[in-house]
Image: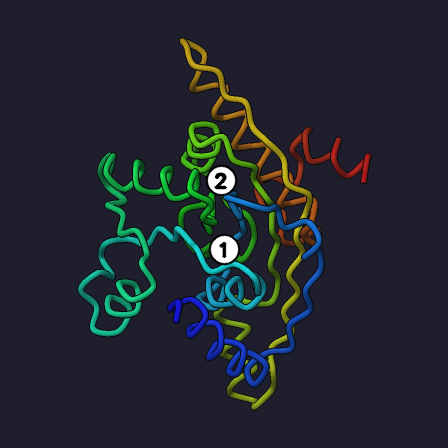
Amino acid sequence: MNPHKIFRFFVKLIIPILADVEVHGRENIPQGGFILAMNHLGRLDAYLLHYCLENRNDFAVPVAEKYQHHPFYGRLGNWLGVVWVDRFNADYRAVRKIIQRMQDGAVLVIAPEGTRSRTEALIEGKPGVAFLAARAGVPVMPVAITGTEDRVVSENWRKFKRAKIVIRGGESFLLDVPRGKDRDEALKTATDEIMCRIAVLLPEKYRGVYSGHPRLKELLKNA
């Protein structure tokens, strides 16, 4: 049996015990390979996306290589076939592997911010997701998560309360990042597009550094 099916089975057993999860936007999930770009608040985030993507069993999940030799996370990652990534150097091997998997139909689950937000709101996105989307030619689906802050989840568990978690998926879109001398600026614009499309799905207090972005204001006006 596919390991993701087994993993999802246990996740779907455990998550309802720990949290009350409300999911919106499943109808926006694309067919074939795509990038699921999410904000990143806490450790539960990756598990919840397995919980939501009920009919997908082919994932390309990048994980920092520092966890590769962890006694639990390393074994779990190897079993699930995650892509171990060197976050501090240009890891071309991992990039090629991720692009190929997406072109073969896999879902890349990734947070453009690159790490959990310590501010509990959006921090600046990195250009890697825009680069991967453009190179692979796959759509990006923005996803916003609230209620998974480690602090909030821990407080609820100590009180034997379930956390209230809301997940919203927006419409997918394609990015065009032309090559050439202006490529860095094009990647920055594409990254802002991804982050603002996540931000528009979030309550105001979670929009962080993008709260005053002109593109977000345009998206809110047209929402």
The colour mode here is: rainbow
Residue at the bottom extreme of this rendering:
160
The residue nearer to you, when weighing 34 against 155, is 34
What SS does tag 2 mark?
Answer: loop
Which residue in the protein does label 2 denote?
124
Q: Residue at horizontal 42%, vertical 73%?
A: 7
- The location of residue 24, given as percent across then percent down, is 71, 60
- The location of residue 34, given as percent across then percent down, is 52, 43
Q: Residue at horizontal 27%, vertical 47%?
A: 85
What SS does tag 1 mark?
Answer: loop
Q: What residue type is labelled 2?
A: Glu
- The location of residue 27, given as percent across then percent down, is 71, 53
Which residue in the protein does label 1 denote?
40
Q: Earlier in the sequence, mark 1 or mark 2?
A: 1
Quadrant including the N terminus = bottom left
Q: Residue 182 carries which label?
A: none
- The location of residue 90, given as percent across then percent down, is 24, 34
The residue nearer to you, when weighing 155 against 196, is 196
Quadrant including the C terminus = top right
Q: Residue at horizontal 51%, vertical 87%?
A: 158
The residue nearer to you, when weighing 183 against 149, is 183
Above or below, 190 relative to 98 = above
Above or below, 63 relative to 10 = above
- The CA distance from mark 1 to mark 2 is 12 Å
Q: Residue at horizontal 30%, vertical 36%?
A: 96
